[in-house]
Image: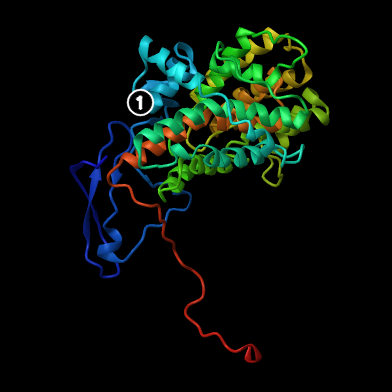
Amino acid sequence: MALDASNKKATLSFSDGTPSMDLPIHEGTIGPDVIDIRQLYGKTKKFTYDPGFMSTAACDSSITYIDGDKGELLYRGYPIEQLATQCDYLETCHLLLYGELPNVAQKQAFDKTVTYHTMVNEQMQFFLRGFRRDAHPMAVMTGLVGAMSAFYPDSMNLNDPQQREISAHRLIAKMPTLVAMAYKYTVGQPYVYPRNDLSYAANFMRMMFATPCEEYKVNDVLVRAMDRIFILHADHEQNASTSTVRLCASSGTNPFAAIAAGVACLWGPAHGGANEAALNMLYDIQSQGGVAKIGEFIAKVKDKDSEVRLMGFGHRVYKNYDPRAKLMRETCHEVLHELGLQNDPLFELAMALEKIALEDDYFVSRKLYPNVDYYSGIVQKAIGIPVPLFTAIFALARTVGWIAQLNEMIADPEYKIGRPRQLYVGATRRDAKPIDKR
């Protein structure tokens, strides 16, 4: 959409003799105002400098809003607390894709569309065999999602709204199947085909944990927990992987390639791999003595000269308690109670560390509250999901957000291929000498 300029202006003055200039200020419906610098280079031959995009709005969006100071997260205006407790994941997908929560008829139609896209081409099984059995699931998922462009050439045109919608349905529907196949491949079990009579989350768990030996029994508490994990991770504004998807799609590539780029970016331990890192931290503490050693671990975290880091706490955007973490914390305790794991040493350790972090002035003063990654890792471990698969499940959940962001960008008449500039600090022009004179 085109930005509407308000009557506000920002006057930029220079100390090097460059004439001052007025920059338009745009107002969002909520959140900070934005200074429009698009004419800056053309008029002054100067760029802005903002490593990590700490103060840069790269686009305008109507999908997700975060107020980090308040600890607020909205999908299309709806608080995440309401969506996580009153809606299921596919309702949330409909909201992110189409802008509104579905009514009964729309939900039935959307659920059916997604459900009947859950199977994948049988040749995907042969593609999987090219990977080592011990390959990291995110390496496998990056390949599988990218390979979808070879299997579904009829929905490759990014500029065709109908093809984009078909590819969206396919990606949302097939990601659980692909994640489950990747898991089954690594453990040497037969693939389990999806069932059309199960919910999205129940279907995923059955494909993960069922075997031909016995009928899989759906546990409603665990299914609800998995569905909530999906909802809480469905979108999160312009994070690293979402920005990657937008940048990739801005070149006009196909939707599957753009989402595969998002999967690759999400793999990083500072992004989607944070829940894996948090659980590995708990394993390290447990191996050194468990709850009795928490004091020593906390002391190392507080020591500026120590390389020990507290994983699963704090967030770059949230300077208050992450609203997703509050919801995931409730789910965490529900799952541990359902499975009778309250006294499990690892989970006792996790809860003890949580208690300290919520009460210790060192962490509270620095806004280092437990984040969603801390609790989701504990929940997934309790359910039986292996640690290396955590990030793949994050990618599964985030796929709808990536697609919604991609669609929004393509529909914007002002979108252009992403092309950041730089502050060059290398050598000035010089001449290359013949090799015998160097």
Q: Amino acid at mark 1?
A: Tyr
Which image quadrant is residue 246 in?
A: top left
- Residue 213 in picture, x, y percent from top left: 78, 13
Q: Residues within 10 Å of mark 1 (few under 14, many from 20)?
A: few
Place of residue 262 in the rendered image (x, y in percent of width and height, measured from the top left):
52, 41
Q: Is residue 402 left or right of residue 185?
A: left
What colour scheme governs how the chains and residues are painted in the rendered image of this protein? Answer: rainbow
Q: Position of residue 105 (x, y in %)?
A: 36, 11
Q: Kindly give the residue lying farthest to the left in the view shown.
A: 7
- Does residue 272 appear left or right of residue 381 in this picture? left
| Quadrant hosting residue 359 | top right
* Relative depth, front residue between 333 and 360: 333
- Above-or-below relation of 154 to 325: below
Q: Can residue 421 be seen from the camera position used here?
A: yes
Vertical comparison of 213 with 404: above or below: above
Residue drawn at 50 percent across, 42 percent down:
240
- Secondary element under disc 1, as helix, strand or loop, is helix
